[in-house]
Amino acid sequence: MNKVQSKGSGRPGTFLLGLGRYGGLGIFAFLFVFPFYYVFVLATHRVPFANPPHLFFGPSVAENFDALFRQIPFLQSFGNSLGIAVLATASVIFFCTLGGFAFAKYDFKGKEALLVFVVMTMAIPPFLNIIPFFRMMVAFGWYQTWLPLIVPGMANAFGIFLMKQFLEESIPGELMDAARIDGLNEFQLLPAVVFPLAKPGIAILGTLTFVGSWNNFLGALVMLPDPRNSTLPVSLSSLFVRSDGNYGGLMLGTALSILPLVVIFIFFSKKIIANLAAGAVKG
Amino acid sequence: MTKINLLSDKRLAPYVFISPFFILFLVFGLYPIGFSIYLSLWRWTMRGPVEFMGISNYVNLLTSDPFFWRAITNTLWLLVFGSFTQHFVAIPLAIGLNDKVLKGKEFFKTAFFVPYITSTVSATLIFSQLFDNNFGWINYLVNFFGGENISWFTAEWPAKVMIATLINWRFIGWNTIIYLAGLQSIPDTLYEAAYIDGATKWQTHTRITVPLLMPIIFFGVTMSIIGGMQLFDEPYVLMGGYQTMGGIANTGLTSAYYLMFTGWSATRFGKASAIAWILFFFILLMTMVNRKITKSLDKRSL
């Protein structure tokens, strides 16, 4: 397509077309990014209400911190969110790399059928089992603990499929054979060969898992419903629902809850975008 | 002779590696799903089973529950104006981005992708301020262009438009990135041939780009259906939780919202499970219709 476009420069109106293209893309980029800028602006004002609405940073960060800590147990919520996200990410990386490795690098009986089964489970909507799942967690004594938000998703279909796609190309069979000749058994291959070579794939899976866990609202609402001891999305949304309009603290909390993702995204955005898109096109 | 054990056997090791998935799926996936069929046949409260209902939960929902149908129509409305509209914006945006000489492409891609990684709750809280009845930017602009303040939270249709806007905002960029990847797999030669034949830009896109994108459009629309039919976070937070049941005239009550209300606020687990299965059936049906439509469009254009 690019060739046609650059050849097309001979046509009348191409310059205007180019201008329109940048204009259009620019407007949408602005619409997508402005709300982020806005929440950081609001985080620095005691009262978000102004006419015209705020556009620049204000002086009230310290005040908003006071308000936020008074209104919700922010550090506890942040800690819960972080703890759950870190443990979920670590366990997903381990179990999905294992599963993906098996599907990518071994031949075994029933492999194709099992893989199809794994992929098909991705189509099951989570709402279907949420009620019995909730009752089960109560029966297990896992209700109001971190476990329901970590354990069931540890070896998930999406992660296994992603790692399978990735490991197929990144681990040479000869390397595995060489390691075997050196006397390593199948499990010793994991730390020696698989995990080191899987690092780029792990980075993507890890980021997606962390972001997904950090943002998970429904799961936390069901399993950790008490806003005094829950994750950030639950305690922030409860603050919004019962708030009297003093949104300064709430906006600061929202801004702080986005911050870790912004940091991660700056590091990984290019890789994630490329891989997700490629996966969708292939799939 | 070496001793064969679990650790060193090449034939057994892969089964060990994939076993965690199957164990977890059995315990936390398959068992609860099966149990939810059973639950849906009972009147079942916090204290346990009360009365066997047969298919009455389903029949009552489908024939005499006004909230249920309200929730379904709300969900479908939001699906059309919140989810399907994304694709009409995302495809042109992807075409605009698909140009190797375009400057700042990485910047645009990142900017478009950022809303997707934000949590629904953060995005919703930000939008609640943008749409504030008295002091938000949206009403400021409405005033600026001579309009009256719109009550985004307390009027039926504005509230729906606000929710739909939020969904569009979150997922247009994601869809754009997916379509862009699809566009990049279309061979240049097709466009060159069209150019030589004197096709206009519009013809090139309607005759080549869109038909060749059909598989990806199917993928994207399917994801929209699955996500849209389960829409919960946005209306729940914007409209104020279980107590309000979707705000004025239940305008934000989606089927997933109603399911959660029925399960957690009213603690009627059997009825909530029946809602879940009806919802699942709707998703299945719509995905099949989507497949049919995509296929027939595909044939017509090629």
Image (cartoon, rainbow, N blue to C red):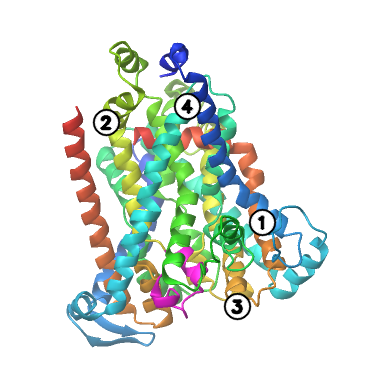
**How packed is label 3: few (under 14 Cα within 10 Å), some, or many (20 or more)?**
few
Q: Counting other residues with Cα less than 10 Å from the Cα at mark 2, is it few (<14), some (14-19), or many (20 or more)?
A: some
CA–CA distance between discs 3 and 1? Answer: 19 Å
Give me the C-alpha separation between circle 2 and circle 3.
49 Å
Count the labels in the image.
Answer: 4
Labels 2 and 3 positioned on one and the same chain: no
Q: Do labels 3 and 1 share a chain?
A: yes
Please indicate whether residue B298 sits to the left or right of residue B194 in the image. left
Q: Does residue A161 belong to the magenta stretch?
A: no
Is residue B249 on the magenta stretch? Answer: yes
Residue A142: give x, y in percent of width and height.
Answer: 50, 71
Q: Residue at x 36, y 72 (%)?
A: B259
N-terminal-most mark, 3 or 1? 1
**Residue B291 placement, left or right of B89:** left
Tell me the SS state at disc 3: helix
The quarter holding residue A203 reads: top right
Give the residues in magenta: B232-252
Which of these two is toward me, A42 or B132? Answer: B132
Question: Mark 1 falls within which chain?
Answer: A
User: For the residues marked 4 and 1, what is the alpha-carbon distance in whole angstroms?
Assistant: 41 Å
Label 1 near label 3: C-beta < 8 Å? no
The reply to whether label 2 and label 4 mark residues of one chain is no
Residue under label 3, please give it: A242
Mark 3 is on which residue type?
Arg
Residue bearing mark 1: A39
Residue B233 vertical position relative to residue B96 in the rendered view, above or below: below
- Where, quadrant-wise, is the N terminus of chain B in this rendering? top left
